[in-house]
């Protein structure tokens, strides 16, 4: 009985496939007949010619996919080398893409440009809002993209620097929700874990007047402790050791806030000695040096 059902299903599949192929062949034949070619004869359509047409169309599609993948691989290589401007120039050509993989990378590249010393204040602001726009589009294209959630959270936080403390605090729960969603989608992404640690650190050191503003905005204002921040920074390091100079720096700063000078010195030294590839790495190196001087006084 099961065998008969399976055979029947297979026959239906074959018949459907044949019908689809014949329909495509008829469509293709009609296209040839109605073309604007000024030929004195009608090209004969044969099963072989149709098969060639079908294969060419298939390989063109595959080639397009390969090209997109090659661009993404090139983009990731440029990012790893710290070639921020070249990376942005490459990705901005795909700003109208429907692929979230292009869009979140473009959001990241736009944001990274803002850290360059050659960028003016006005250009930095424009790029900050541009990055958020690309991140938002990436999220609209693919809600299941952990990177889209991560970079939307980061870029939304950046925009808060221009919108004022009230807006920045108002966005805080949205930011945390997207970070948690990113970690849920990819528990092995150390960057998302790090940023959630940074979120906790920021609220742990919130000034008294900012806490008052938060109390006005929220019935239950967001709170966090240095211990919570430390747990996230350590988790990020466990997931991907030595992955990010800023995580090393934040571990050192968190231990400083917890009055653990020995561990603070250990992590700040690692941050200082981290290879300075990007502009952010250079800033981290400078800050780590300054903090180590304070600890050694």
Image (cartoon, rainbow, N blue to C red):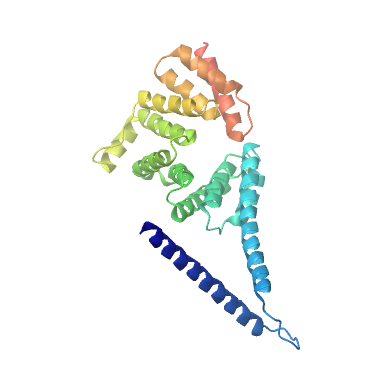
Residue at position x 55%, y 23% from top?
Answer: 271
Q: Is residue 148 placed above or below 258 in the rendered structure?
A: below
Q: Quadrant of the N terminus?
A: bottom left
Residue at position x 65%, y 49% from top?
Answer: 70
Residue at position x 29%, y 35% from top?
Answer: 212
Q: Is residue 80 placed above or below 140 in the rendered structure?
A: above
Number of numbered callouts drawn: 0
Image coordinates of residue 27 in percent, x first then y, are 58, 78
* Residue 110 visible in this rendered orientation of the protein: yes
- Give the farthest residue toward the left: 219
Looking at the picture, tell me which residue is in the foreground, 24 or 228: 24
Q: Is residue 236 left or right of residue 24?
A: left
Image coordinates of residue 216 in percent, x first then y, are 26, 41
- Give the farthest residue toward the right: 40
Q: Is residue 248 placed above or below 132 in the rendered structure?
A: above
Looking at the picture, tell me which residue is in the foreground, 119 or 79: 79
- Give the farthest residue toward the bottom: 40
Residue at position x 46%, y 29% from top?
Answer: 236
Q: Is residue 174 left or right of residue 69?
A: left
Looking at the picture, tell me which residue is in the foreground, 154 or 141: 141
Looking at the picture, tell me which residue is in the foreground, 245 or 47: 47
* Residue 118 visible in this rendered orientation of the protein: no
Image coordinates of residue 168 in percent, x first then y, are 39, 42
Q: Is residue 280 placed above or below 286 in the rendered structure?
A: below
Image coordinates of residue 256 in percent, x first then y, are 44, 18
């Amino acid at each position: 009985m099961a065998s008969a059902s399976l055979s029947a299903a297979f026959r239906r599949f074959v018949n459907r496939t044949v019908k689809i192929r014949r329909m495509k062949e008829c469509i293709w034949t009609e296209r040839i007949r109605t073309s604007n070619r000024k030929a004195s004869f009608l090209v004969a359509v044969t099963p072989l010619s149709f098969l060639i047409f079908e294969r060419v169309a298939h390989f063109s599609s595959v080639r397009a996919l390969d090209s997109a993948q090659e661009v993404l691989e090139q983009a990731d290589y440029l990012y790893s080398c710290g070639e921020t401007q070249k990376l942005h120039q490459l990705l901005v050509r795909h700003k109208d893409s429907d692929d979230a993989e292009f869009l979140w990378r473009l959001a990241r590249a736009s944001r990274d440009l803002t850290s360059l010393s050659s960028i003016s204040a006005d250009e930095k602001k424009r790029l900050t809002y541009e990055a958020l726009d690309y991140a938002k589009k990436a999220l609209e294209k693919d809600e299941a993209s952990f990177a889209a959630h991560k970079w939307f959270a980061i870029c939304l936080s950046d925009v808060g620097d221009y919108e004022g403390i009230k807006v920045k605090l108002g966005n805080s729960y949205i930011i945390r929700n997207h970070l948690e969603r990113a970690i849920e989608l990819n528990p092995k992404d150390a960057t998302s874990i790090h940023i959630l640690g940074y979120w906790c650190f920021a609220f742990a050191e919130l000034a008294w007047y900012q806490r008052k503003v938060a109390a006005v905005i929220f019935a239950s204002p967001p709170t966090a402790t240095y211990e919570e921040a430390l747990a996230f920074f350590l988790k990020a390091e466990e997931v991907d050791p030595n992955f990010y100079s800023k995580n090393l720096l934040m571990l050192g700063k968190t231990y400083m806030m917890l009055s653990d000078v020995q561990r603070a010195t250990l992590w700040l030294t690692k941050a200082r000695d981290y290879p300075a590839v990007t502009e952010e790495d250079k800033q981290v190196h400078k800050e780590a040096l300054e903090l180590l001087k304070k600890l050694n006084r």
